[in-house]
Amino acid sequence: MITNKQLFLLNTAQTSNSPKMLEIDFAEGIYLYDQDGKAYIDLVSGFAVSNIGHRHPKVLEAIKAQLDKYLHLTVYGEYVQTPMVKFAEKLVSVLPPDLNNVYFVNSGAEATEGALKLAKRYTGRTGIISFNNAYHGSTHGALSVMGNEYYKQAYRPLLPEVSFINFNEPADLALITEQTACVIMETLQGEAGIRVASTAYMLKLRQRCTEVGALLILDEIQNAFGRTGKLFAFEHYGIVPDILLLAKALGGGMPIGAFISSKKVMGVLAENPILGHITTFGGHPVSCSAGLASLEVLLEENLTEGVTKKEMLFRELLVHPLIKEIRGKGLMLGIQLDSFEQVEKVSSLCSDQGIIIDWFLHCETAMRIAPPLTIKEEEIRHVCAVILNVLDQLHTH
Ligand code: PLP
């Protein structure tokens, strides 16, 4: 009989020649269980999605309650749908006063698209500044602001008037001018292998954008919801973006994205032309119900609070001659090794021992460690012991 794994390769589009091929039966908390009942600790959180763990009971409860009411009703922005209204109200309540207007979409890339359009429309300008090694999604607009030529070359022409500057390099800020509609930046760069800018740099960037009237778009699609030890990563720097991008953990495991700005800026999408941004499924009632429950769990269980202590434990335990550097903040860590071969080997040996790690799109020589924020101290000790043991095996061979 043909297996699911064979059908996966046959009938579903492949994005590489080396998919992980794990077939998961069910997931709970920080664990994934395969068809044979083998448990895996998810140190990747489904790529920064499962911040409160997989299938949190309160998220499941909220989804089930909404299933009994309605699923899709109509396109975004027409009917008053309670799950969306309540979720926006909650998000606004935990954000600074100027981030008070939420446009819900379906994914991170779509949040990027909406924000780029909004910045062009609001400023009447056309220039866009992004960063080398940035990642904001894979659709045409988002790809245009990706800071890695390798992934773009085959898909040109892309958006015009996009320039790239270096992350954390104050001299480059002079390239932000009165022609710039927006600067789009990951508050902490994720796919670059986790890069953290200095507070002084972030303050200068904010100041420069304000000076020339360019909107600052902070992409927190990977950074937000406690991942870095604050609810939102920009809180580390005492700055506020003009537009904030969210997705991934926003839905508590359901697909949803958002771009958030002030009512004044967002208002331009409603006129000249009307329907400045359209989505059929944006703000889906089930996703919004799940997202609201997930945010409530994060706040009620105070999950952000323990994050820095857990980061310190990882940093204290992960000491090994093969580890060159540990970058990041909170539970968003890049463990720098020497080569992709090493990272691949560690990933494969860890997987044998029931631990899932990964690498980064623009930095294949570093390991990604981003577990659910609910990971316990003894679980951190266990995964670090396994990783060190695996690194020893590499070191001695
Ligand atoms: N922005 C950042 C920082 C991301 O890490 C990602 C996805 O990895 C995206 C945008 C795109 O999100 P999505 O895959 O939901 O389109």
Image (cartoon, rainbow, N blue to C red):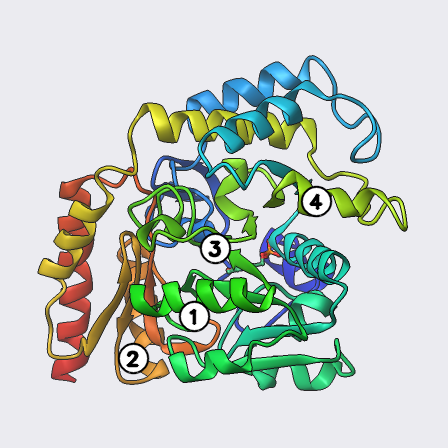
> Which residue type does callout 1 highlight?
Phe
Task: State the residue lying farthest toward the front.
Answer: 211
Residue 146 shows up from this direction: no
For residue 266, the mark is: 4
Q: Position of residue 40 (x, y in %)?
A: 34, 48
Q: Which residue carries the number 3 mark?
A: 22
Mark 2: give few (<14), some (14-19) or many (20+) Cα within 10 Å: some
In the structure shown, which secondary structural element does the residue marked by tag 2 occupy?
helix
Distance between mark 4 and mark 1 Cα atoms: 33 Å
* Left or right: 183 in relation to 41: right
Residue 117 shows up from this direction: yes
Tell me what residue is drawn at x 52 percent, y 40 percent. Answer: 250
Q: Which residue carries the number 2 mark?
A: 342
- Comes first in the chain, label 4 or label 2: 4
In the structure shown, which secondary structural element does the residue marked by tag 4 occupy?
helix
Q: Which is nearer the eye, 288 or 100?
A: 100
Badge nearest the viewer, 3 or 4 = 4
Distance between mark 1 and mark 3 Cα atoms: 19 Å
Q: Position of residue 78 (x, y in %)?
A: 83, 29
Q: Which residue carries the number 1 mark?
A: 360
- Comes first in the chain, label 2 or label 3: 3
Q: Quadrant for residue 162, please give it.
A: bottom right
Distance between mark 4 and mark 2 Cα atoms: 46 Å
Distance between mark 2 and mark 3 Cα atoms: 21 Å
